[in-house]
Amino acid sequence: MMYWDIFLAFFIPSIIGYGGGPAFIPLIENEVVGRYGWMSVSEFSRVLALGNALPGPIATKMAGFIGYEQGGVLGSFVAVFATVAPSLILMLALLGLLYRYKDSPRVKRMTLLIRPTIAVLLGLMAYRFFAESWGEAGALQTLALGALAWVLMERLRVHPAWVILGSLAYGGVFLG
């Protein structure tokens, strides 16, 4: 019964919480603090602060922690699964629908329209990262790291994962 409660405590907010992790937080608090009484508001706020301090989606981090506190490793698994299950189910249903109509001229046209939109969004994200790096690390280090990354990936064919790891190490040692 405990695992079913853990599942419901995270599945329901994931279904009705539109807008990602930050939209889920009050809904999860209502379930965890108000409905099930697993934590006090103070404890929940500490878990929220810890979740914000770690990288990655906040809803899954909180689900993993609270699920572990209530039901151990299996409780953690159930809570994380319940958090991602609505999106997973919807994605599978939409992919099935898309696959069924993949040869439709409308679907092909939609795909052609989505690609430039994604390219623009990626470009905006790269610009924001660049601007933040320029302000935080300085122009010289930003340009040097960018040029070095370009040479490593384009000229020397180093895998991007190694370039990212090297950049993280550099940032941790010299900028951290």
Image: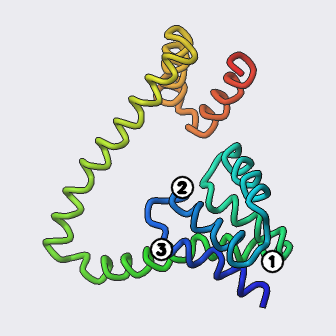
Helix, strand or loop status at disc 1: helix
Identity of the amino acid at label 3?
A: Ile
> Is residue 116 positioned above or below 79 on the image?
above
Residue depicted at 71% across the width and 84% down the height:
5
Which residue position holds label 2? 22
Helix, strand or loop status at disc 3: helix
Labels 3, 1: front one: 3
Within-10-Å neighbours for mark 3: few <14, some 14–19, many 20+: few
Q: Is the N terminus in the top left, top right, bottom left or bottom right quadrant?
A: bottom right
Which residue position holds label 1? 74
As drawn, the label of residue 16 is: 3
Q: As drawn, is 100 to the left or to the right of 34? A: left
Can you give x and y, in whole percent of width and height, for residue 16 in the image? 47, 73
Spatial distance from mark 1 to mark 2, Cα to Cα?
A: 25 Å
Can you give x and y, in whole percent of width and height, for residue 71 in the image? 83, 76
Identity of the amino acid at label 2?
A: Pro
Within-10-Å neighbours for mark 1: few <14, some 14–19, many 20+: some
Task: Write down the quadrant of residue 127 in the picture.
Answer: top left
Looking at the picture, the colour scheme in use is: rainbow
Question: Looking at the image, is mark 3 or mark 2 earlier in the sequence?
Answer: 3
Question: Looking at the image, is mark 3 or mark 1 earlier in the sequence?
Answer: 3
Query: Which residue is outermost to the left?
Result: 105
Can you give x and y, in whole percent of width and height, for residue 46 in the image? 76, 51
> Is residue 139 positioned above or below 95 on the image?
above
Residue depicted at 34% across the width and 36% down the height:
123
For this rendering, which residue is in front, 23 or 92?
23
